[in-house]
Amino acid sequence: MSIAANKVPGVYAAHCHDVDTARYSRLHNNSNILTMGARIISAELAKNILDVWISTEFEGDRHIRRISKISDYEHKICPSCSFSEEGKTVLFEHPLVQHKVSMIRDKNTSVKEFRELVQEIAGLMVYEMTRNLPLVKIEVETPLAKTEAYALAGKDLAIVPVLRAGLGMVDGILQLVPNAKVGHIGLYRDPDTLLPVEYYCKLPGDIDKRDVLVLDPMLATGGSAAAAISLVKEKGGKKISLVCIIAAPEGVSKVHAEHPDVDIYAAALDSHLNGHGYIVPGLGDAGDRLYGTK
């Protein structure tokens, strides 16, 4: 029973086929919902499974130690990241990322510098995100001899910026993964309702076969990001991650609530939204600062 298998807070479901899975689902996962396959489990076995499941107590402290080991492993594979408790939100703590985030927050940073920094931050974030891409052994010939080397195992990526601010992150990522396909989703936030309005959507035809990175530098209310993710899913996208530079708690909660299967990657998690839906302290309007329209 995977600790991460259940997506609804407070729900720990276990699908058991024998008394051992019933016992360990309680010991390790504190399961509170039991399911069984009626077609393959006899009435007698079902009763035994139920008896064991009801009589077994959650291990508590030992479970917490197991969670701690999982957390240690996560930090081992991504040492410059921190992992939140609610859903999977990964915050990048790498010194270069934090330094550059401080620079784009500065209201005196020029349009040129802002644009370059956003590209650099996006590239650094995706560098960490792709740390565990699978590799295959290949043979190459150097000027001196043949030798074994490694190449990416052909895992296909697609990046989907939310227009217009998301475009500022694209080039920084393409410098690392130049073969990634690029889709575009056009959304704007209604200034009165703060709800997203779609005006454009063009995605790669094989989006269902690719790992998808949705790019939205400012995760504020979460409405636009959640709507963009829904559009990707409607077109067949399955494994989706959201990449943003600065997030607000309200946006994180919105995306996790509507898309618990989507991981969120951010360089900073700020305090709150103001009455106009802007992130505080934030950096202002990312689109305006990228393109000098304010």
Image (spheres, rainbow, N blue to C red):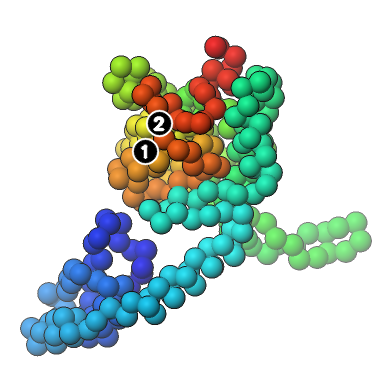
Between residue 45 and residue 26, name the one nearer to us: 26
Between residue 125 and residue 15, name the one nearer to us: 125
Amino acid marked by disc 2: Leu
View extreme (right): residue: 144
- The answer to whether residue 95 is above or below residue 148 is above
In which quadrant of the rendered view does residue 133 lie? Answer: bottom right
Q: What residue is at 69 percent from the left and 44 percent from the top?
A: 96
On residue 273, the disc is 2
View extreme (top): residue: 294
- The answer to whether residue 111 is above or below residue 138 is above
Counting from the top left corner in percent of width and height, residue 229 is at 38, 38
In which quadrant of the rendered view does residue 176 lie? Answer: top right
On residue 250, the disc is 1
Secondary structure under tag 1 reads: helix
Q: Report whether 83 appears left or right of 228.
A: right
Counting from the top left corner in percent of width and height, residue 179 is at 61, 40
Give the class, few, some or many, for how many residues have Cα within 10 Å of label 1's Cα (few <14, many ≥20): some
Q: Report whether 87 appears left or right of 247.
A: left
What is the distance, in whole Å, between disc 1 and disc 2 at their CAs?
Answer: 8 Å
Q: Report whether 231 appears left or right of 244.
A: left
Give the class, few, some or many, for how many residues have Cα within 10 Å of label 2's Cα (few <14, many ≥20): some
Q: Do the residues labelled 1 and 2 touch (CB within 8 Å)?
A: yes
Note whether residue 168 is visible. Answer: yes
In which quadrant of the rendered view does residue 30 lie? Answer: bottom left
- The answer to whether residue 160 is above or below residue 20 is above
**Which badge, 1 or 2, is on the more N-terminal residue?**
1
Secondary structure under tag 2 reads: strand
